[in-house]
Image (cartoon, rainbow, N blue to C red):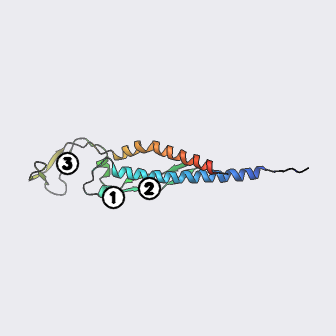
Amino acid sequence: MAFVQVNIGTSEALRSLKRVQQQIDSSALNSWKNSTEVALQFMKHNGYIDRTGRLTRSMKMGAVRRRGFLSFASSVRAEAKYALFVDQPTKPHDIVARRAPLLVFFWGPPNGPGEVVGARKVKHPGTRGALFSDMTAKHMIGRFQVATQVAVDAAITRSP
């Protein structure tokens, strides 16, 4: 009588599970990196018209770090010194000349010639804020979750 016998021990099953776990984690990490790059592109192209391009050039992607199994951290940020003031709204405030006797600026119609004005102190009306960081977070949070879930499902399907 002929028969086929398969011996499966717990150590072989654990090794197989470890390989599957590594495939899942690696696939999810790659998905997270791709999603972080998409978030950076979203931040650069939405919410703010950058006249000089300096703020957009200062937007960078931070390192993607593994914190544990299927746990990652990454960031996108604007490194320009004035990025926070462009991004977040400001209340009306006074601007006072500190290093010079007067603040000097052009005052006039938007498309016409302006006259040069000097003042020791001016009242700034405040800004609405571009809110590009908030828009990026709201837009991307669901996409990170979906992309990671798809990557995990694909890794499980591919595993032996």
- Name the mark nearer the viewer: 3 or 2: 2
Residues packed near mark 1 inside 10 Å, few (<14), some (14 to 19) or many (20 plus):
few
Give the image location of residue 155, x and y in percent.
60, 50
- From the image, tell me which residue sits under label 2: 62
The image shows a total of numbered marks equal to: 3
Q: Secondary structure at mark 2?
A: loop
Distance of mark 3 from mark 2, alpha carbons?
Answer: 34 Å
Q: Amino acid at mark 2?
A: Gly
Foreground residue, 16 or 130?
16
Dot placed on the residue nearer the N-terminal end, 1 or 3: 1
Residue 118 drawn above or below residue 128: below
Q: Is residue 107 left or right of residue 40?
A: left
Residue in the picture at 40% in, 52% down: 40
Q: Amino acid at mark 3?
A: Ile
Residue 135 drawn above or below residue 44: above
Foreground residue, 117 or 58?
58
Q: Amino acid at mark 1?
A: Arg
Q: Which mark is residue 95?
A: 3
Q: Which mark is residue 57?
A: 1
